[in-house]
Amino acid sequence: MLKGIKINLDLNNKQRTKLAKHAGTARHAYNKGLEYCNDLFKQKINTPSAIDLHKWLVANIKKEFPWYYDVSKCPPQQALRNLKVAFENFHKIQSKSGYSLYHYKMIDGVKKPVGLKGLPNFKKKGDKDKFYLEGKIFIKDNKIKLPVIGYIRISEDLKNKFDDVIIKNCVISRKADKWFVSFKYEVNPVFTEKKFNVVGVDLGISKLATLSDGVIYENLRPYLNAKNELRKLQKELSRRYKKKADNQSSNYKKTKLKISKIYARITYVRLDCLHKLTTYLAKNYETVVIEDLKVSEMTKNSLLASAILDGGFFEFKRQLLYKKQLYGGKLIIANTYYASSKLCSCCKNKNNDLKLSDRIYICNACGNEMDRDINASINLEKLINMAGSLTVNTFGDESPTTNVVQLVDELGIGHQMHYFIA
């Protein structure tokens, strides 16, 4: 299986300039290509293929801007491939019947269309700067060799881990003031010896994860902790912004960089917490049972949206999926509408009057009283017993790793349970 890795680069000033020039060239090629494709779209002419776009770039743009030849040919080529994909997605959106094709905005009290949905946007300098490279790429000791750019030090000691790894291509990206290299490489699954059999995992806001064996992982809430600092800096940024100015002041750029660093730190803290949790679950439990949470629906509650997104629920599921394939075992994903919180883990009685504010579950039938999250995680753990007594039917993807178990509870309500086998 393929595994991705992202490594921080330790750069000097010359190397920073080279990377910025490559990213700038990719951005320039994308924007020029988008301008050309927009003109064709207005004339009702089909968008050219990525190859035709590159031929157009060589014939028209590179002559006008000779600094294209100072960098690798890969960044502008990949930028135009990405542009082609963006326009394909745009046309798919526009072809949907019964779907609003425009963005609307209130202008002078009247709702007016202001743009087409899905139409690609122009890229801005310093916003998600990245570029693609392919060719002779390898890592030796604590350096990585990149085409045209040369050897660059990496910020961690990999201890000859990638000396024999074949790297066909990579992506260089910038977040705040740091540059990263990311690539994929082939790995063989390493099935670890499991200490425990089954565990149910209930995700939440106050507690990030509650395991059915009583272990609780607190939610670090990195965005909430940095919110006050961000508010002050964003006010400062707003004061320093000059309307209709071609170039903003140095102080404006410094404040903007400070904000970017805080957002980067929030991301790093959240990912570090999720990686530690999912790795622990994948390595130590034979079977993990989680819920298939619809984050987009949950965030419609404006009071809880920020806290829900701060937990990274979708990223938790994504990481657990590939780590179970890497370390072995099973992952069961219960249907979104399985009432894990409302069911009593002792007698299966359903409490329909349970509110979100009720943190202690009290069963009206048997008198069971326990923490709401632990009750939900135990219900998820018990799903494995129901799966064992039913036939596993393959649907959708016919690979041996994805199956579904049709579950029918005592109330006669059908549930789907995705059953991933590593």
Image (cartoon, helix red, strand yellow):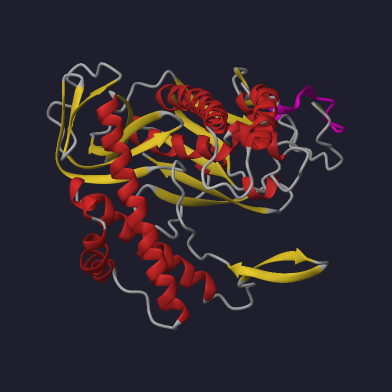
Asked if 18 appears above or below 41 in the picture, the reply is: above
- The number of discs equals 0
Question: In this view of the protein, can residue 207 be seen by the observer?
Answer: no
**Is residue 75 rendered to the left or right of residue 300?**
left
Quarter of image, res 83:
bottom left
- Position of residue 39 in the picture relative to residue 355 (left or right): left
Q: Nearer the viewer, residue 242 or 270?
A: 242
Can residue 389 be seen at all in this image of the molecule? yes
The answer to whether residue 363 is left or right of residue 145 is right
The image quadrant where one finds the C terminus is top left
Q: Residue 341 at x, y = what percent? A: 73, 36
In front here: 421 or 22?
Answer: 22
Given the current orientation, which residue lies at the most extreme bottom position?
44
Residue extent of the magenta highlight: 362-375
- Residue 366 covered by magenta stretch: yes
Whole-percent x and y of residue 217? 60, 20
- Residue found 59% across the figure and 17% down from its top: 215
Residue 420 found in image quarter: top left
At x 51%, y 30%, the residue is 257
Q: Which quadrant of the figure has residue 111?
A: bottom right
Q: Position of residue 131 (x, y in %)?
A: 31, 45
The residue depicted at 76 percent of the width and 64 percent of the height is 106
Which residue corresponds to the image point at 16% horizontal and 40% vertical from the top-left?
A: 148
